[in-house]
């Protein structure tokens, strides 16, 4: 790739300054696969230059992760030690505070062929153990951001006909393009993009929507109720300390958390779902009384069933996200087999945990009070894509109007 080193430096500065946005005196924790070492080093330097007090890198290796899941005992894999949680909480509770940057390069089929039930139990135990930290990240108590880089298994999954080097180069191009990081001024581009998402969120919030109704020729026929004092959000977010940051890079969505128990009908997935290192493909979910009561999948249906039975809230919705079909990711013509990207290709829903920060003035309420309003609780939050070229979404408002939100897969306003 021409001028790759220059692009990599620009990307590092971009995801640090625009993404996680470390403040003077904060500690930045970077979680990174071994393949990402060159990018991580640039991010470390950029964070220090931004005023970070300290930068720590946690290295990860997919090959080791698979071996441990395959050969390790379930008892050992779920034997959590207090320091594993405290290393995050100690920094979060310290005077300078903490922020976290996740650099990902996930193999979409990392755990293919392994015991799915074991993987589910181990992951469930891990999520439960880390729940106190997840409350920080899910509720804007700290800044966090996710950005991607290529790794060979992921690149070869997306570009099987190319050599290793060619596939990685193609994936780099796709990542930089879809993250709006390859232009002359990515920071200005993101400022405009965030302003557009904020304006669309405001329009939706001003409507006073009671219910969203979805229809598509592929079989999606679905309605979901919204909570009166819960807002749509989109683009960057502001932490409780007043720091603006961008959690997902890329992002194209305007989203909210729906009312637990208010979902009826069937939704048909339009992209594969990579879950626990395996792909769930060509699936549908039927909801009744807000709960997923019936699922079908051509591949890994048992894994889908395990997912919705992970805990009591796993079968209920935690998110409704609106993404135009005419998005950079969908227009790239690529299926990424990675939720960070594929969820931003088109409209999607998420099973599991809802977003407390969608509650208007959420900082005035306890988490329990937010749950009482209808925000779902679960150890999982799994996005799956339902957008299509003919998807129609209509809003039923609390004052009796029917307002078109999506027509032919795209915004109607």
Image: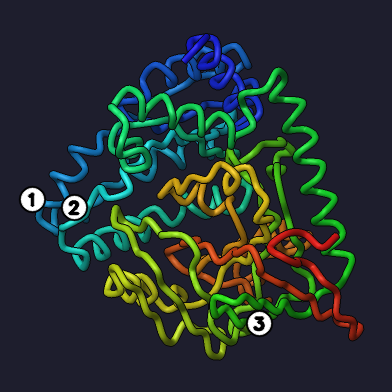
Spatial distance from mark 2 to mark 1, Cα to Cα? 10 Å
Relative to 356, say whether 111 is above or below: above
Residue annotated with mark 2: 77
Q: Position of residue 254 (x, y in %)?
A: 70, 56
Residue at 47% in and 60% down: 271
Which is more N-terminal, label 1 or label 3? Answer: 1
Q: Find numbered disc 2 in the image and state the secondary structure of the residue it sits on.
A: helix
Question: What residue does disc 1 label?
Answer: 71
Q: Position of residue 263 (x, y in %)?
A: 60, 83
Question: Which of the two discs, 2 and 1, sits closer to the camera?
Answer: 1
* Residue at position x 78%, y 79% in the image: 210
Badge 2: residue crowd in 10 Å (few <14, some 14–19, many ≥20) = some
The residue at 87%/60% (across/down) is: 203
- Residue 302 picture location, percent across and down: 27, 74
The reply to whether dot 2 and dot 1 touch (C-beta < 8 Å) is no
Rendered position, 99 above or below 135: above
């Amino acid at each position: 790739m021409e001028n790759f080193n220059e692009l990599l430096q620009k990307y590092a500065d971009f995801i640090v300054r625009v993404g996680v946005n470390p403040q003077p005196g904060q500690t930045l924790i970077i979680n990174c696969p071994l393949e990402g070492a060159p990018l991580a080093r640039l991010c470390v330097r950029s964070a220090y230059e931004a005023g970070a007090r300290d930068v720590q890198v946690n290295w990860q290796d997919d090959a080791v992760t698979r071996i441990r899941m395959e050969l390790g005992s379930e008892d050992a894999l779920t034997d959590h030690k207090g320091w594993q949680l405290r290393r995050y909480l100690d920094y979060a509770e310290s005077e300078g505070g903490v922020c976290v940057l996740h650099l990902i390069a996930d193999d979409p089929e990392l755990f293919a062929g392994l015991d799915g039930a074991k993987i589910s139990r181990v992951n469930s135990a891990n999520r439960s153990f880390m729940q106190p930290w997840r409350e920080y990240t899910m509720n804007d108590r700290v800044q966090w951001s996710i950005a991607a880089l290529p790794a060979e298994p992921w690149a070869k999954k997306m570009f099987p006909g190319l050599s290793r080097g060619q596939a990685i180069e193609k994936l780099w191009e796709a990542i930089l393009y879809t993250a709006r990081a390859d232009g002359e001024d990515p920071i200005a581009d993101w400022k405009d993009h965030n302003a557009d998402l904020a304006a669309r969120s405001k329009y939706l919030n001003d409507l006073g929507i009671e219910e969203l109704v979805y229809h598509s020729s592929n079989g999606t026929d679905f309605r979901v109720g919204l909570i009166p004092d819960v807002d749509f959000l989109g683009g960057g977010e502001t932490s409780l300390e007043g720091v603006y940051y961008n959690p997902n890079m890329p992002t194209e969505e305007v989203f909210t958390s729906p009312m637990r128990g208010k979902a009826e009908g069937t939704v048909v997935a339009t992209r594969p779902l990579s879950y626990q290192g395996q792909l769930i493909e060509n699936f549908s979910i039927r909801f009744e009384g807000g709960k997923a009561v019936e699922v079908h999948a051509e591949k890994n249906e048992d894994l889908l069933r395990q997912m919705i039975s992970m805990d009591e809230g796993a079968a209920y919705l935690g998110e409704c996200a609106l993404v135009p079909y005419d998005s950079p990711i969908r227009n790239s013509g690529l299926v990424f087999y990675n939720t960070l990207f594929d969820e931003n290709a088109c409209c999607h829903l998420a099973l599991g945990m809802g977003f407390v920060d969608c509650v208007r003035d959420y900082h005035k309420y306890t988490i329990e009070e937010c749950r009482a309003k209808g925000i779902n609780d679960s150890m999982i939050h799994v996005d799956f894509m339902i957008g299509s070229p003919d998807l129609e979404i209509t809003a039923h408002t609390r004052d009796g109007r029917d307002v078109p939100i999506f027509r032919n897969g795209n915004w109607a306003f």
